[in-house]
Amino acid sequence: MTDDKQNLMKKRTIQAWKRYLFLAVSLTVGVAIWFLLARLLNLPAFILPSPGMVWQRFWKSLLDGQLIGHTLVTLLEVLAGLSIGGCAASILGYLLAKSPTLEKLISPYLVASQSIPMVAIAPLLVIWFGPGIFSKILICSLTVFFPILINTVVGLREVPQDLRDLMRSLQASRMQTFKKLEIPAAMPIFLGGLRVGATLSVIGAVVGELVGSDSGLGFLINVGRGQYDTALVFVAVLTLAAMAMALYGLVLLLETRALSWQSWRQKDVER
């Protein structure tokens, strides 16, 4: 390994540790503010439980298997919905980017679908497809579909025309142009949409579970709300937040790996 690669790896490690340090400080400050509010306001536990009560409820739910079981159900819905919605959005986005006529035909329906809140559509999907896991995956897929679709279209259309002309001059086939030019050029914008979709996928899954389900973190929120067990609601909500942050981090890691060839990222690491 050369000295340049070693230095680059060291700088990346230092930068990663700095991010972890900032995250730890931010979480510590947030918990401290939460603790002070609970002590100063002196509200009942069913309105604002203290961090200690939530921590105890977390361990209780974890040890009896309740939290793990419901988290796995929601995670399955999120991963399946993100995968299906992302693949469908990528394929349709490519077709829309290549065919302005198709975009004019479909775009009114796409825009109209985004004007309707998912909370209003979710009950219909649960009625049509039942309260099982399929309706939750469908709701999750629809939630992530639009941002990934738009970023795919924008990314493909942002490919410089002079690079397209260069590929034609080299007599590259359509598949070669797609693999060697369009995918690398559109990848930054596409991954930006995937980051948004990763966080929205958690919201979509929970919306479906809140409407009607017998498992998942959304169901756990309904149980805690019905029993005035606010600490359990906090546990479920914080687990959802951790899930969304983990998915966002995974996409960010994928983005770092996939776009390592970009010179501006190397410069950003070296700062």
Image: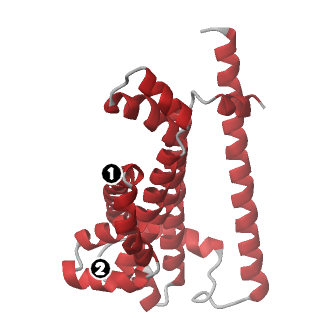
Q: Amino acid at mark 2?
A: Ser
Looking at the rendered structure, the kind of residue marked 1 is Ile
Q: As rendered, which of 50 and 192 lies closer to the eye?
A: 192
The quarter of the image holding the C terminus is top right
Q: Tell me the distance, in whole angstroms, between the alpha carbons under discs 1 and 2.
A: 31 Å
The reply to whether dot 1 and dot 2 touch (C-beta < 8 Å) is no
Q: Residue furthest left?
A: 129
Find residue 259 and report its image quarter: top right
Residue at 44% from the left image edge and 73% from the top image edge: 111
Secondary structure category for the residue under label 2: loop
Disc 2 crowd rating (10 Å Cα; few below 14, some 14-19, many 20+) is many
| Coordinates of residue 205 in the picture (x, y in percent) | 38, 70
Q: Is residue 53 above or below residue 21?
A: below
Q: Secondary structure at mark 1?
A: helix
Above or below: residue 263 compared with residue 62: above
The residue that disc 1 covers is 91
- Residue situated in front as seen by the camera: 243 or 167: 167
Is 47 placed left or right of 152 in the picture? right
Report the number of numbered marks: 2
In the rendering, which numbered label is found on residue 52?
none
Q: Residue at x 46, y 32 (%)?
A: 181
Question: Residue 1's x, y, as percent?
Answer: 59, 9
Query: Can residue 68 be seen?
Result: no
Residue 254 versus residue 106: which sits nearer the camera? 106
Quadrant hosting residue 123: bottom left
Q: Which residue is mark 2?
A: 213
User: Residue lying furthest top in this view?
Assistant: 2
